[in-house]
């Protein structure tokens, strides 16, 4: 049961209908009037697989913005593709750090070296050094644990090392 006593709060909540096939005109009209998103079970399955394979990759607060009133499969697919592209970028960076360390005697690598190698590694997208550093910190957080970090005196003196792969299918 829905226990929202506040009408304004009810309007802000994400309302979702999951069903196979094409929705009827009446259902589509009702969904639009009441602000409900309609998705197919296959789209939900893709979201669940993404979250299962890459824990914490699906951000429900951001996903809510893609749940438009009416048929929302295309918008949710855009979100899934966006998350997949972010994961590919992070996988590329983890692989790059691993490759740099494999070619050195030292088991850590600095931000400037990673940045230089990144720019020549056929990257999925162009990044500035601060953007790359931010992603490196994210990948070295205890929640993700793909890289390790030795904190330097500033962002350019931070060093990173490989912990585990971020495989992409």
Image: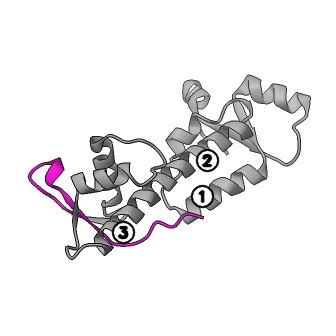
Q: Quadrant of residue 93?
A: bottom left
10 Å crowding of disc 2: few (<14), some (14-19), many (20+): some
Name the N-terminal-most of marks 3 and 2.
Answer: 2
Element under label 2? helix
Residue lying farthest left? 153
Q: Quadrant of residue 69?
A: top right
Element under label 1? helix
Marks 2/1: CA distance? 8 Å
Marks 3/2: CA distance? 28 Å
Name the N-terminal-most of marks 1 and 3.
Answer: 1
Q: Are marks 1 and 3 in contact (CB under 8 Å)?
A: no
10 Å crowding of disc 3: few (<14), some (14-19), many (20+): few
Q: Are marks 2 and 1 in contact (CB under 8 Å)?
A: yes
Which residue carries the number 3 mark?
99
Q: Residue at x 30, y 73 (%)?
A: 103
Specify the label residue 80 is tagged with: 2
Q: Residue at x 67, y 43 (%)?
A: 77
**In x, y percent, where is residue 128?**
32, 40
Magenta stretch, residue numbers: 149-169
Name the N-terminal-most of marks 2 and 1.
Answer: 1
Residue lying farthest front? 120
Say whether residue 85 is magenta: no
Element under label 3? helix
Q: Are marks 3 and 2 in contact (CB under 8 Å)?
A: no
Which residue carries the number 1 mark?
50
Q: Nearer the viewer, mark 3 or mark 2?
A: 3
Specify the label residue 87 is tagged with: none
Q: Nearer the viewer, mark 1 or mark 3?
A: 3
């Amino acid at each position: 049961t829905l226990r929202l006593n506040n009408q304004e709060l009810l309007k802000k909540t994400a309302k979702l209908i999951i069903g196979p096939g094409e929705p009827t005109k009446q259902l589509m009209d009702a969904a639009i009037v009441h602000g409900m998103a309609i998705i197919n079970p296959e789209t939900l399955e893709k979201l669940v697989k993404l979250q299962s394979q890459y824990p914490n990759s699906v951000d429900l607060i951001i996903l809510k913005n893609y749940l438009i009133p009416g048929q929302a499969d295309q918008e949710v697919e855009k979100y899934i593709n966006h998350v997949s592209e972010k994961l590919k970028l992070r996988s590329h960076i983890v692989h790059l750090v691993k490759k740099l360390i494999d070619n050195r005697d030292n088991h850590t690598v600095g931000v400037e070296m990673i940045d230089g190698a990144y720019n020549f590694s056929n990257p999925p997208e162009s990044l500035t050094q601060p953007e790359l550093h931010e992603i490196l910190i994210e990948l070295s957080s205890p929640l993700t644990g793909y890289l390790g970090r030795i904190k330097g005196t500033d962002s350019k003196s931070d060093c990173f090392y490989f912990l585990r792969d971020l495989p992409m299918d």
